Amino acid sequence: MEPVNVYEGLSPVMSITTTKPSYIGAEEYWRLEDYVKDDFAGVLIPNASIRKRIKDLSVAIRDDYKNKNPHFIWVADGAWPFFRDFKQHYREVAGNGFTEQLSRVKSYDGMSSTGKRKFLDVDFSDVAGKDIVLFEDIIDTGGTIRDVFDYLQQHDPASVRVATLLDKRVEKTHPVKADYALFSIPDEFVVGYGLDYDDSCRDLDDVYVLSESGQRRLA
Ligand code: IMP
Ligand code: MG
């Protein structure tokens, strides 16, 4: 008999419990000069692992939005690599039946959340009746996604779900449950794959923990 593949949805969030570097699949890391590597305590999530989780996410969202055309909203700037790679996989498995827009929200200054969200580029005038999936790079205290979520609800969408690449294990001052969370990470400041330290290091392929010397050098 032919083996049957039964897809059972996205497996639960992958919990990363160590901050010890893992270099499997972190190809870009080996191309960096040593003095550049010194800015990092190590690679927390290599690109290969991120891509694998995103592929699973695209299948899960396809299955959850059967017969619907979801509207994807990604939170700029940080969620771009996540959303870009998601879309590529999603189109392969689910086709072109989706729409998208960005919303730009800023809350961090250096390494601490300011608690004050700036809605810089947000137009939700067209979301009524749509099935929304919100894409965020990281949920830390929960404040940013909570604000976007609440603001969205005022514009009468049919439904809203949240997809986050990372969920930081810290106390959530604004409780919010991500419907799709790819990795749960320890309370470390991370950069790469969209995440920045005052707009540096966003473009790296992997997710890194900043070292103390890196924090000083890039401050
Ligand atoms: P929250 O509002 O506290 O949940 O923070 C969410 C926002 O803070 C994210 O969209 C990120 O822009 C930023 N942020 C939180 N933790 C980190 C981090 O470890 N590295 C980079 N940015 C972070
Ligand atoms: Mg962000």
Image (spheres, helix red, strand yellow):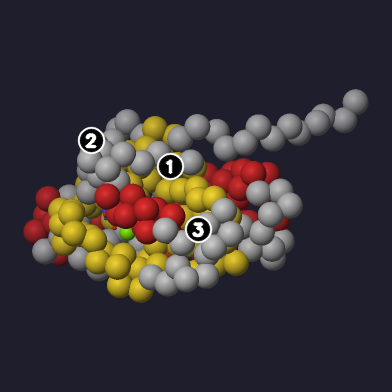
Q: Position of residue 126 (x, y in %)?
A: 52, 70
| Label 1 sits on residue | 178
Q: Which residue is painted at 69% across and 63% down in the image?
A: 97
Q: Position of residue 201 (x, y in %)?
A: 28, 64
Q: Secondary structure at mark 2?
A: loop
Height in image: 74 above or below 138? below
Q: Position of residue 39 (x, y in %)?
A: 19, 56
Q: Amino acid at mark 3?
A: Asp
- The quadrant of the picture occupied by the N terminus is top right
| Circle 3 or circle 2, nearest the eye | 3
Height in image: 24 above or below 152? above
Mark 2 closeness class: few <14, some 14–19, many ≥20 residues within 10 Å:
few
| Circle 1 or circle 3, nearest the eye | 3
Q: Which residue is painted at 33% across and 50% down in the image?
A: 146
In the depicted view, which residue is nearer to us: 68 or 76? 68
Tell me how far mark 3 sits from mark 2, CA to CA. 30 Å
Can residue 81 be seen in the rendering of this structure? no
Q: Which residue is painted at 36% across and 62% down in the image?
A: 78
Mark 1 closeness class: few <14, some 14–19, many ≥20 residues within 10 Å:
many
Tell me how far mark 1 sits from mark 3, CA to CA. 20 Å
Confirm or deny contact between disc 2 and disc 1 (CB under 8 A): no
Q: Which residue is painted at 20% across and 65% down in the image?
A: 198
| Label 3 sits on residue | 156
Confirm or deny contact between disc 3 and disc 2 (CB under 8 A): no
Q: Quadrant of residue 75?
A: bottom left
Q: Give the mark, 2 or 1, whose residue is nearer the N terminus.
A: 2
Q: Amino acid at mark 1?
A: Ala
Q: Give the mark, 1 or 3, whose residue is nearer the N terminus.
A: 3
Q: Amino acid at mark 2?
A: Glu
Q: Secondary structure at mark 3?
A: loop
In the depicted view, which residue is nearer to us: 160 or 112? 160
| Label 2 sits on residue | 171
